[in-house]
Image (spheres, rainbow, N blue to C red):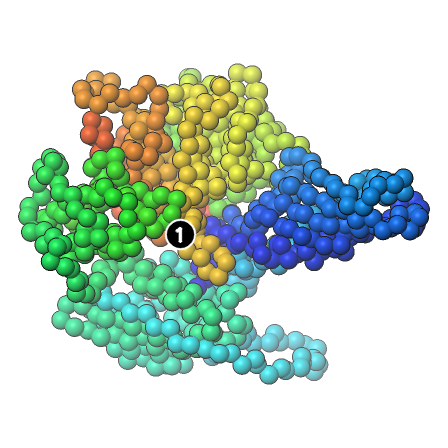
Amino acid sequence: MALPPSTANWHWKNKNVSRWGSEWFERELVTISVKGDNESEVVSVTKVTEVDGDVELGQRKSKLITIYDCKIVLTWTGTASDGTEVNGSLTIPEVSHEVTLDRLSDYTYHWSLSTSTSPTVEALFQLAKSRLPAALEAKFAEFPVAIIDTHGKDLTVSIEPSRVGTPISGTASAPAPASSSSPAPVQPKKTDPKKINTKVVTVEATFQAPADDLFTLLTDEKRIPIWTRAPAQSTPQVGSGYSLFGGGVKGKYISLTPSREIVQTWLLQSPTWPEGHIATLTTTLEQSSDSTKITFSLDGVPSGIEDEIKRNIEGYYIHGFNSIGYVRLIPSEPINTSSSQPRPVKRSKIPSKDTSSTSYVPAVAIAALVLVGLRALESDVLLGFGVEDEVRASPHVQAIEECKEKDINIKCISSDRFLSTLEPNIWKVNVQMASKPFEPSEWYSLQRALHTPAHVSSLAFDHAGHLSAGSDDGSLRVYDLNSFKVIRAIRGLGEEISSLVCLKRLGSELPDVWLASGRRIMKFRMDSPKIIQIADDALLVVDVSSPDQENDELNEIALNANKTHIGFTLDSGAVGIVELATKAVSKMKSKHESICGCIRFIPDRPRELVSGGYDTALLHYDYHEGKILSTHSFFSLLLSAEVVGDVTLSPPFVVSIAISSTGIIAAGTADGRLLIGCGGYKAPKGKESGGKKRSRKWDGLNVEEEIITKVAEGPLVALAFEDSGNLTVSTLLGVMTRYQIVYDHNEGSVSLDKIWQQETQSVKKVNALIVDEKRIAVGGLTAEGKGIIEIWGKKP
C-alpha cells in the first residue's frame, strides 16, 4: 500500500538483488573481447565461474543508492599469433560501489595461466593483462546504472500526476483520454486484458469503539486523514469515488449500510499490483455490548502477493486506528499447561522497588504464565518474573508483543536484559513488567505554525532563544520566537542545508551559524548588517569531501563541548573532524560500511564522539587518537526485518542519536526501535552517591546497561534530551513522544516511562526536532509538499 508520494520516497527501503546481480555479471562479462596490434591475437571472457557477495539497492531522501561488493572469478581464452589456443582464469576480489563510483581504490586483478608457456603464449598473456582490465572496468561502470534502471521503480513512488491525489469520477480503473483540437486522433490498438488468478484476503480486528464511529472513520473525508496521515477524498454515496493515502488507494463505493457494511472497488497504486486491476473490498462491522469486530475482506488480490496485501491492510488500516488511540482487544485463547508448570500469579498491588522477591522459573512456563497473567491484569497489577536461560522463545515474543499491544511497560532489572542475539529468535530475558495505562499529560500545546517556501531540513536554537531553520533549497531563516518573524536569512547556497549548529558570539544577541550544505561546511555571522546573506558572505567555507567523490554529501554536523571542533558525517560512511582554530579537516581511518547519517559528541569528553549509520552500527571514536573505542550493532535485528518480496522495509538503520548531559545515549532506528544506553552515565556534581563505582571511561555502548525496545512502526527520525532524564522522540510521520528515563546506576536498572504524546498537526513528514526548557520545534513538510515548522510551547 502506497504512502503519500510527498513522503513515500523518504521512507527507508532496501532491495536485495544479489541473484539478479550474479546473472547480470554472468551474462554481460562474456560479451567482452579485446584484440592486439596483431589482429590474429584475440582474448575473450568465456565464462563467469563465481560471483560472491551482496548487491542491494537502497533509497534515502528520494535518492536511489547502489550498495554492492562482489568477488568475481572468470575464465578467459585467446588465440596467440601462431594460432595456439591459450586459456587462463582471472579473479577480481572487489567489484564495489566504492571502487566503481567513489574510486576509493583501484581494481585488483589476480591472473593465472593454464596453457604451457612459450614466447607467443606469454605475449598473449601480457595482452590479456594490459587490455582486458580496461574493457572489464567499462562494463563494471554500467552495473550501477543497470541496477537502478531495473529495480529503481520497485523502491520509488512516482509523484505524478499529483502530489496529493485527485478526486475520482466514475471508474478508477483508467484515466480519461486527454481532449484534443486535432481531428480524429489515431487510437492505440486495444489488447485483451491478461487473465489474473486472484485470491481473497481477510483481516479481522476487534476495537473498543462503537460501530458508527468506525464507519465514520472509514468514510468521512474530514476524519480519514486522522488515521491515514495523508490527504483523502471521499463522498460516501453509491457510485461516488474515493481516494486514500494521498492517491495510493482509489475506487468507488458500491454499497453503504451505515454502521454495518461498506462495499467498494479497490485499486492499489503499487509496482506489485497489476495496472488497472480492480478488487472489491467488503468491510463489515459487528457491534457487541462493549466492542466492535471489523472485518476487511478483499476479493481479487493477485495470487502471489496475498501476504504483502494482508500485512499492508494490518499496517495501514488496523495500526492506523491504533495510532490514534483506538484500543484493539486481543481475543482470549485457552493455554494448556501441565501440572508441573506454575500456577498463574495472584493479582496484587505494585510493590516497592525492592525486587529481591522476584522468582525464577523455566522459560516456557514463563511464556504461558505471562499470557495468562496479561489477561488478568488490572491497572494496579505487577507481574514480576525472570529468566536466566537462553531459549527459543517464540512464546516469549508473543507475550512481549501482547505487552506492547496493552501498553505495558517493560523494565530491565539487571544486566540480564531483554536482549536479542545474532540468531533473531533467541532471547535472554530478565524483565519486570507492570501495567501502566498511559494518560498523556498536557505538557505542550501548539503555539504557532510557520510556513516556508521549501521543505524544512534542519533546526537549531541559539543562546538567545532564536530559531534557525535550514531548508532543502539551500536557504536558512532565523526567527524571533516572540514575534514569530524572520529577522535574518541566507539564500542561494544551491544545496540542502542538512544540519546546522549555532555558536554564541560574544556581545551579540545573534549567533554564528555553522551549516552543512552539500559537500561544504560554511560559517556565517548572523549579526551581519546584511539582513539576507548569500554564499559569498560566508566567513569560512570548508569542502570536506574528496575531489574524486562527487556524490559524497554531508548529513550531520555537531560541535564539541569545548567549541573547538566540529564533527561531520558523509554518505560514504566516513566520519570526520574540522579543527576550528586551523580549519584543518581530518577523517577517521575506520568508517561505516554504508551511509553515516548522525553524530554526537559526548558532553564531558570533547574529543570523543558517537556516530550512527545505515550499516546498523554505532561507532564510538576518540578523534585525537584516531581510533574506535567501542561499538554497537543492530545487525541481528536486520535478520528478522520485514521483507516484502525481496525488499526490506525500514531495516534497523541507525537514523538518530542524542546524548544527555549525564552521558546517557539514545539511538533511534528506521524500524522504530529505541536504544537507551546508561553505561556512560555520570551523576551531576553534588548528586553522586555511594554503591556501584563508575568507570572513568565512557561506556555508553555497554550491552549490559542498555534497553532496546520497539516504540513505533516507522523510523525514529529525531531524538532530543531536554535534561538528563527526559527524552523527546519523533517518528517520520509526526508522532512526538516524551519518555522519562529512570536509571539506578547502583543496581544497573533502567526504566522507560511514556509521559507525553502528541501528533503534529500540519507536519506530515518530519525532518528535524529540537527542544529547550520552554518549547519543542519540529519541522518538515506538509501533505501538499510545502515547508512547515510547528512550535509547541510548554504549559505553565
Q: Quadrant of residue 242?
A: bottom left
Left or right of 331, for residue 776: right
- State the residue at coordinates (56%, 80%): 194
Q: Pick the residue in front: 36 or 511.
A: 36
Can residue 134 be seen here?
A: no
Between 301 and 78, the one nearer to me in the picture: 78
Q: Quadrant of residue 245?
A: bottom left
At x 57%, y 20%, the residue is 584
Percent coordinates x, y for residue 208 in the rendering: 19, 64
- Relative to 57, 284 lies left or right: left
Which residue lies at the image location 41% right of the left edge and 29% below the top edge?
Answer: 630
Mark 1 secondary-structure assignment? loop
Residue type at mark 1: give it: Ser
Query: In this image, 117 relative to 641: left or right?
Result: right
Answer few, some or many: residues within 10 Å of disc 1's Cα (few below 14, many 20 plus, some between 14 and 19). some
- Percent of width and height locating residue 298: 38, 75
Q: State the image coordinates of residue 553 (x, y, percent, origin top left).
A: 57, 37
Q: Residue at x 66, y 34 (%)?
A: 105
Give percent across and percent down for residue 389: 25, 44
**Residue holding disc 1:** 640
Using the rendered view, name the quadrant where residue 22 is placed: bottom right
